[in-house]
Image (spheres, rainbow, N blue to C red):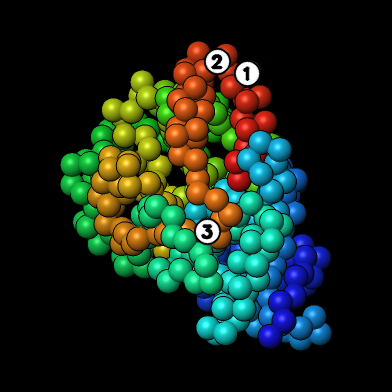
């Protein structure tokens, strides 16, 4: 077998392949890849064993990241919780894995990282990275059953509390809603001591995904208290980003939004809500997602690397950044995010 490389943004076979492949997610889609390229300048590419003249039978989509700060590498995919390699056989998997191994060994890339949704054995010299957890909620049952399965105190009572408080919400993909969400996001990311993603990222997602992207904003007394960004793809809605005003957290606005996003997705015929990945060192967030009745599974990334990660240096840099984020003005915080995320995909 020979490995071929194609451009998924210009080769129409990729969009057709993603549409028909049952394991393809929104993170494989052309609009998602286009938004990454527009915002961060990363070049998307697909490795496949299918010849150029034949319909695609397999492929793994990645992005080239060229950074003077973090090195030259390819990742499948930056800013994506998971991106299943769409192999059609163990042979194609092995051949492409060997190609990654050789490229890293020869110094072409600092590392290659893939982010499979399903648990798969490390192959062809790759090493498993520290695992996280993926949370998927089956929303195909009747809404009453989904509600009943949710945790009484943390979910159902929170929805009732928001209703009693007069919380209302609106959804859409207008520039105005994006702006409201982004202001909440700045607050939220500051609390977590990390910079926000650039606003251009959300603008490009909206432009590329169109009506497949929905921004949700919850209001209390006409003031925004919580927000979320959902992405529809095939039969799944991805709960990709959330933000809130911590001073109003007792109202239950975030839970209220998630519940109504589930109801809207059901009305649109979707059957799954992807609550995304959570690091194992965040047990509080894991517990919150599990209270919705999700199915949690192990999510482990695979990496081909020339050298061991330098955890100590990374931790020192992270600690310094957190101290700076705590005191940065909003304008500086936004600028830091615009610069930083070009290097960390």
Query: How many numbered dots are placed on residues in this image?
Result: 3
Residue 200 in view, yes or no: yes
- Tell me which label, 3 or 1, sits earlier in the chain: 3
Residue 13 point in image, percent of width and height: 74, 75
Q: In percent of the image, x 60 and y 66: which residue is there? A: 101
Q: Which residue is mark 1?
A: 332
User: Which quadrant of the rendered structure holds the N terminus?
Assistant: bottom right
User: Which quadrant of the rendered structure holds the C terminus?
Assistant: top right
Give me the C-alpha separation between circle 3 and circle 1.
33 Å
Residue 283 or 92: which is nearer the viewer?
A: 92
> Is label 1 in a helix, a strand or a loop?
helix
Q: Which residue is mark 3?
A: 303
Q: Is residue 338 above or below residue 26?
A: above
Q: In percent of the image, x 70 and y 67: which residue is there? A: 46
Residue 301 or 196: which is nearer the viewer?
A: 301
Query: CB atoms at circles 1 and 2 under 8 Å apart?
Result: yes
Give me the C-alpha separation between circle 1 and circle 2.
6 Å
Query: CB atoms at circles 3 and 1 under 8 Å apart?
Result: no
Residue 97 point in image, percent of width and height: 58, 72
- Tell me which label, 3 or 2, sits earlier in the chain: 3
Q: In percent of the image, x 57 and y 85: which residue is there? A: 91
Q: Which residue is mark 2?
A: 328
Query: CB atoms at circles 3 and 2 under 8 Å apart?
Result: no
């Amino acid at each position: 077998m020979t490995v071929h490389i194609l451009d998924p943004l210009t080769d129409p076979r990729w969009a057709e392949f993603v549409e028909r492949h049952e394991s393809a997610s929104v993170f494989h889609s052309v609009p998602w890849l286009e938004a990454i390229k527009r915002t961060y300048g990363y070049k998307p590419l697909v490795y496949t064993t299918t010849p150029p003249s034949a319909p695609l039978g397999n492929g793994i989509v990645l992005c080239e990241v060229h950074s003077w700060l973090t090195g030259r590498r390819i990742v499948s995919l930056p800013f994506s919780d998971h991106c299943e390699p769409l192999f059609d056989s163990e042979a194609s998997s092995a051949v492409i894995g060997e190609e990654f191994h050789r490229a890293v060994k020869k110094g072409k890339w600092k590392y290659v990282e893939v982010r499979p949704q399903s648990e798969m054995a490390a192959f062809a010299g790759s090493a498993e990275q520290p695992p996280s957890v993926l949370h998927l909620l089956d929303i195909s049952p009747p809404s009453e059953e989904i509600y009943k399965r949710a945790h009484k105190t943390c979910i159902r009572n929170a929805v009732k509390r928001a209703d009693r408080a007069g919380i209302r919400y609106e959804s859409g993909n207008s520039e105005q809603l994006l702006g409201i969400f982004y202001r909440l996001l700045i607050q939220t990311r500051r609390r977590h001591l990390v910079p926000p993603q650039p606003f251009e990222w959300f603008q490009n997602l909206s432009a590329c995904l169109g009506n497949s992207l929905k921004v949700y904003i919850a209001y209390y007394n006409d003031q925004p208290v919580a927000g979320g960004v959902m992405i529809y793809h095939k039969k799944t809605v991805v709960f990709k980003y959330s933000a809130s005003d911590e001073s109003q957290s007792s109202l239950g606005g975030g839970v209220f939004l998630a519940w109504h996003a589930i109801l809207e997705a059901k009305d649109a015929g979707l059957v799954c809500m992807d609550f995304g990945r959570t690091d194992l060192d965040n047990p509080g967030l894991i517990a919150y997602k599990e209270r919705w009745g999700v199915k949690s599974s192990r999510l482990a990334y695979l990496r081909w690397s020339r050298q061991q990660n330098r955890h100590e240096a990374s931790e020192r840099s992270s600690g310094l950044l957190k101290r700076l984020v705590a005191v940065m003005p909003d304008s500086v915080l936004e600028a830091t995010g615009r610069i930083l995320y070009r290097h960390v995909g």
